[in-house]
Each structure stands twice: as C-alpha cells, then as structure tokens.
Image (cartoon, rainbow, N blue to C red):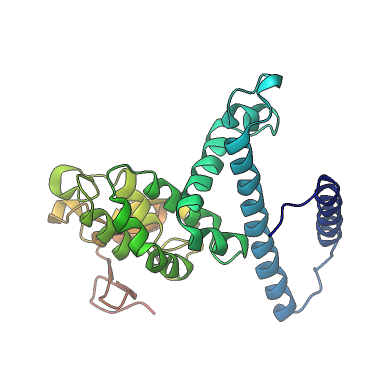
Amino acid sequence: MDPASDGDIVALLADAVDAITTLGSIDATTADAQVLDQLVAGVEQLRRMTDAAATDAAAIVDARNPFRSQGYMNARTYLKQRAQLSGPEAHRRLQTAHMRDRLPEWSNAARSGTVGVAQSEAMARVTANTHIDAEVLERDAGMLLDDAINAALVDHIRRVVYDSSGTIIELGRRSRLFRGSSRDAVMLLLTTCVWIGCDQPVAWCDADHSLGWKAHGPTVPRNGQPLCNGHQHLKETGFQVYRDNHGHWHIIDPHGNEIT
C-alpha cells in the first residue's frame, strides 16, 4: 500500500471525527436487546481499532521523530507533552508498537479490532521480556493470538516462558504473590472475575491461587485466576475454584456441589 498524501490524511481524519461524533449522538435508551448488543460490540471494535491507529501513529513518531527540532528528543517525550498522555500510557503505546512490529499477526488483529487492548498490552509486556527466546515467541505467536481472542492465554504463555532461557515465570514456592509475567499470564485468563455471575473487571481483581498458599499451592499461572476482593473472602470460607484440562472453570461450594 502506498503512503497516504498529507491531504488524504487530513481529510480521512476529519471523516473519522465526523463519524465518531455521529456515533456519540445516538440515543439508544429505547433500543431492543439485539440492537443494543450490536452497538456495544461495534463500539468496542471501533475502540480497539482506534487504539491500534494511535499505536501506529506512535510507532511512526518513534521511527522518524521529525520533532527533534521542536525539543521533543524522543517519542515518549513527544507523546507525553504534545498528545498530553501520561508517562505509563506513552510507554504502553510504544511497547505495544514494538510488539506489533515483531508479530505481524497481532498487528493485523489489532487493526481489525479482533483482539482486545488489554490482551495486546499484556502480550507487549511478555514480548519485551528479554529472557524469552525470540524463536519461541515468534513460533507460538499465532497460537497465543488465537487464545487471546478467546481470553484463555494462561497455558500457552506459561509454555512460552518455560521454553525460554532464564525467565522467572515459574515462581513455585519462592513467592506468595503473583508478580511480573506470571501475574500477566493469570490476568489474561478472563476479562472479569472468574466467579460465575460476577462482572467485576480484571483491573479490579487480584491474581488469586486456585489451591491456596497455605495448602501448598504453587505460585504458577496454572494455579491462578483473577478474583475480586469479595469473592476472595468468600472462597476462604470453603469454596473451591479450579480450571479443568479443557480450560473450563468450576466453582464448588463447601458441601461439594458445583455452582452453575
């Protein structure tokens, strides 16, 4: 594809702003469930695609940086000051751009809105781990993407890290808390708390042990799940949470009955 002209870029950006403005003016308070479902899904896809476009723009600034003469000595500084991003958000965009540059399949999925922003962000952190062998990462990138779309990355991310040299995702009994890549892998399991019917987003959850620490449960991704604070306390009263070999979650009450 040939690069767009300056005039085309300005015109296309104006068209996009007009389209989003129109979208924002929709009053869906009386929409039926099916239409509302389409609206929610469609807006989420647009959000993902817009984030991918923002990441593409950040990548171009990072590669070219035509703003040095204006005092922006690197892309991160430019994004923070000119685009008014926080430091962590500027870092996220650039780290995600680097990941997508290495993994074209992830890049295409992001541009089409197929894979979520959070999944791409976590994969970017995994990709940035210098202890993960490049050949292993690139070999399993497609498999990781398939699982990211289905929100079930944990087993494959664990395998990638195990196969690489010197990584520290297998914490075992050396740590009581999930940290770093190990926590990322656990939090990619789901988009909400694992408890059936709970809609608390993973951002409000902790990486919790399936088999508890006191019961000698290891601090490894296969023994973890995202759990909100309320259900962590409930789990401590005798409930069990585990994931079977097919990737399905089960919650067992103190009497041995499964909650469905």
In the picture as drawn, the residue positioned furthest to the front comes out as: 2
Q: Position of residue 158 (x, y in %)?
A: 27, 58
Q: Quadrant of the N terminus?
A: bottom right
Is 192 left or right of 47, judged from the image as shown? left
Is 231 left or right of 15, judged from the image as shown? left
Image vertical order of residue 14 relative to residue 195, above or below? above
The residue closer to the viewer here, 99 or 155, is 99
Residue occupying image coordinates x 26% and y 75%: 244
Q: Position of residue 28 (x, y in %)?
A: 80, 68
Q: Is residue 233 visible?
A: no
The residue closer to the viewer here, 10 or 76, is 10
The residue closer to the viewer here, 180 or 161, is 161
Q: Quadrant of the C terminus?
A: bottom left
The residue closer to the viewer here, 17 or 105, is 105
Q: Position of residue 235 (x, y in %)?
A: 30, 60
Is 147 left or right of 51, judged from the image as shown? left
Q: Is residue 260 visible?
A: yes
Residue occupying image coordinates x 76% and y 52%: 4
